[in-house]
Amino acid sequence: MISLQYRETDYNTELSGSFSSDDAFFNQLWQKSQRTLYITMRDNFMDCPDRERAQWWGDATNEMNMMMYALDTNSYSLYKKGINTLIGWTKSDKVLPSVVPSHNFSNELPMQMLAGINGFWQYYLYTGKKDQLLKVYYSAKEYLSLWSIGANGLVTVVKQIAEVLGKTEDIQGYDIKLSSIKVAFNSFWTNTGYRSSQVSVPDDRANAIAVLSNLADKNKYPIIRNVMVTIKNSSPYMEKYVLDSLCQMGSMREAQDRIKDRYADMVTGPQAYSTLWEFWVKNNGTKNHAWPGGALVTMSKYMAGVAPITHGYDTYQVKPDMGCLNEINTVVPSIKGDIIIDIKRNLISRNFKLILTSPKKNICNCCNSSFYK
């Protein structure tokens, strides 16, 4: 018998993470997010496999956050390579290039690059790899110097990197900029949320960033929460930041409702694929685009509640916020080893059971040093 078949090529990483619950919608979305991430990894984090294979740094940042919950530690090498390429292609104008490597795209995409700076810190938090901070600090510092006013949270991130690396001479300057930015940004506050005088209604993306950057005090959360419930301007790329902000405000039910509304066509619609689309409408972009996968992080980091507290998972939290769910089972492939969580609750009987399997710390008989496996 003669047959024509194919063998799928892939990046050298395993799908070590998992998430399941008593809600099939969330399970399917997590799996599709993981699948889309996996097939957009080759020589670099690809924009997509079917239209272009360039490394857009906004995509790479979202994909790096996803891989911390979806893939084994071999995946770290691709982000490290991405950092080397990004820094290597930065020119004397100090602008971090949005697409590298590329000879035919030279436009700056500030939103992607500023998000990328935050990604530098997130990578360190999850892996504890200080050598990567050494590579990016100077470039991040120089890029922020181009901005008279930047995003408060990003100044905080670079200040944190400076503290880790002992760059004490830079810290006072960051503190001064932090104070001035918060005052300036809060001048845009209205009784309907943050917005400029040039628009009639607030935007979900701007208000989400205000929460994540600690620009918004907690007494503003009720109004910002209403923005997230009623305004849905974000692209699939920016949806991650909106969901993160809802979770940080303690609004998991609202986050879950928003996920089911925004991702309905991708997950259960008649045109749904095994992968996620570039835009909310399928035919407006590619059919295999990893940047919408931020909801994967929402489920593992916030619903299951697994996240590092100090760098490299030296300490971590299990702080589930289940919302409408009653069962969650997840595997988080941390740098210390798999963290396995099994949660069951019964709201009627008011029973709650959580089983945690944490990486075991071992002592080497040869040199008496500790390690995890």
Image: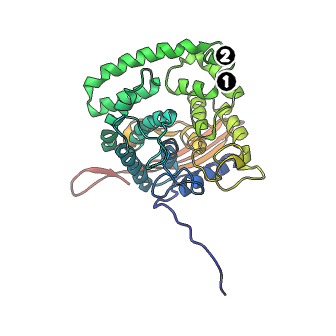
Which disc number belongs to residue 192?
2
- Which SS class for mark 2? loop
Q: Looking at the image, can residue 80 be seen?
A: yes
Position of residue 150 in the picture relative to residue 353 (left or right): left
How busy is the neighbourhood of tag 2: few (under 14 within 10 Å), some, or many (20 plus)?
some
Look at mark 1 in the image and give the residue it sits on: 227
Q: Amino acid at mark 1?
A: Val
- Which SS class for mark 1? helix
Image point 64% across, 25% down: which residue? 203
How busy is the neighbourhood of tag 1: few (under 14 within 10 Å), some, or many (20 plus)?
many
Position of residue 224 in the picture relative to residue 215 (left or right): right
Which scheme is used to colour this image of the protein? rainbow
Q: Residue 101: where, in percent of width, then height?
A: 43, 50
Q: Residue furthest bottom?
A: 1
Mark 2 to mark 1: distance in Å?
8 Å
Q: Residue 270: where, in percent of width, then height?
A: 78, 52
Of 78 and 371, nearer the camera is 78
Image marks 2 and 1: residues in contact by CB distance under 8 Å:
yes
Of 372 and 57, nearer the camera is 57
Q: Residue 226: where, in percent of width, then height?
A: 68, 23
Q: Quadrant of residue 248?
A: top right
Q: Amino acid at mark 2?
A: Thr
